[in-house]
Amino acid sequence: MTEPDRGPEADTADEAISTDPAELFELYERQSSDDETPVTAVFEVQRNLDVRLDRFLARRVPFLSRTQLQRLIDEEAVLVNGRAPKASTKLRRGDRVVATLPPPPSNAIAAERIPLQILHEDDHLVVVNKQPDLIVHPARSHKSGTLINALAWHFLHNTGGTLSTVGEDIARPGVVHRLDKHTSGVMVCAKSDVAHWRLARQFEVRRTEKRYLCLVHGEVEPEADVIDLPLGKHPTIKEKYAVRHDELGKASQTVYRVREVYEGCSLVEVELRTGRTHQIRVHMSHVGYPLVGDDLYGGRHVTVGDFDPSQPDAAAPLIARQALHAARLGFEHPVSGTRMAFEAPMWPDLARAVELLRATRLKRVLAAPGAILDLGKSAPGSSGTS
């Protein structure tokens, strides 16, 4: 006899809940590219079962192998009644099982020669400075031309190794966290399953350090603040997110510090305390300072001439994407435990925008207590690693 699979609502708004295998799969497919909210399966056992925990989960999370589920249990990503169990734990009536699942990956990744800027690589992970307009992983409408395709080529022709095999039958090998297609900057991908589980856990419990740079319209006031506003899907526009003060809003915190002020624009350092879809874009727009280039949330595309009409290429597009760069990522190495941090220089479009604004419209440079990013780093060249 088996118990019903549907459990009660989770205790926190951070949990994305589904207990039906098809719904779990659909959650993975729908999960937006920059949402770090983990997918969580919650089960409440309705009757005594003479079955091990790993076997119980294998029937309900069929897209992960039993070995992978055992690793999940070993890494304490599965809790029974709030405690870390063993794979052999027998379940009883009234037990509450909560399994936090890593982003699922794919087993058919074609190697493609796409330039990459590698910041660090070892046997367990690789850190890259992702270029804008590069999708992180293959999906239904994008089977090629992604960061994962590029990494497959890099491993095959340059350094060896592979991405992790966690959930390899569905979509995203090695993908521990993601950046939106148009956002540039630091990303870490796992090369081993151990690294995958442990890095994913750090993102889940917010032990990572994430700093971004964004160029926004307007001279931001106050010059430092915490935006603490819940976010969720826009009620009427499918591709947008919005501040929501209802049951669909998830707790979201953004700390910003203005680094430089120009006439009509500001360069802002952002510290994320949560990782919601479009979080920086929605929060900054909501307080009146949309990102340059972000036409989805009130920003506008700019040309070279918008910042300096004297330039010979004044009519050329300069920022045609959200001006957002993941500048710093810090975490503990999943195997050695060493604290690591990586900073990525701005990509040429954003770097040139800042250069032009400094030359023509700079009003003040701020001390910004708590800011840590080095604004002196130059933009990457076009060579990179390929």
Image (cartoon, rainbow, N blue to C red):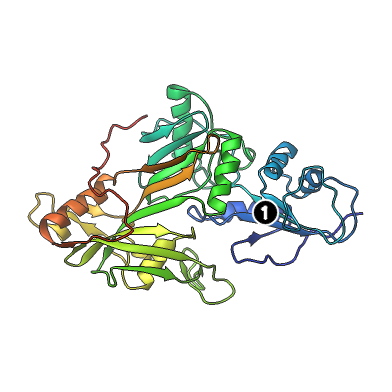
SS under mark 1: helix
Amino acid type assigned to the residue bearing label 1 in the image: Leu
Q: Vertically, is 382 above or below 263?
A: above
At horizontal 71% and vertical 44% (from top left) the residue drawn is: 73
Residue 285 image point, x, y percent = 36, 69
Task: Quickly name the residue at label 1.
Answer: 24
Q: Is residue 370 left or right of residue 72?
A: left
Residue 215 image point, x, y percent = 28, 59
For this rendering, which residue is in front, 252 or 156?
A: 252
Q: Residues within 10 Å of mark 1 (few under 14, many from 20)?
A: many
Q: Is residue 61 left or right of residue 227?
A: right
Q: Looking at the image, how many numbered discs can be counted on the residues?
A: 1
**Residue 46 appears in which quarter of the rendering?**
bottom right
Q: Is residue 180 visible?
A: no
Q: Is residue 373 visible?
A: yes
Residue 258 image point, x, y percent = 28, 63
Q: Vertically, is 325 above or below 284?
A: above
At horizontal 56% and vertical 46% (from top left) the residue drawn is: 200
Residue 231 image point, x, y percent = 49, 68
At horizontal 56% and vertical 54% (from top left) the residue drawn is: 205
Instruction: Specify the farthest residue to the left.
Output: 310
Which quadrant of the rendered structure holds the C terminus? top left
Which quadrant of the rendered structure holds the N terminus? bottom right
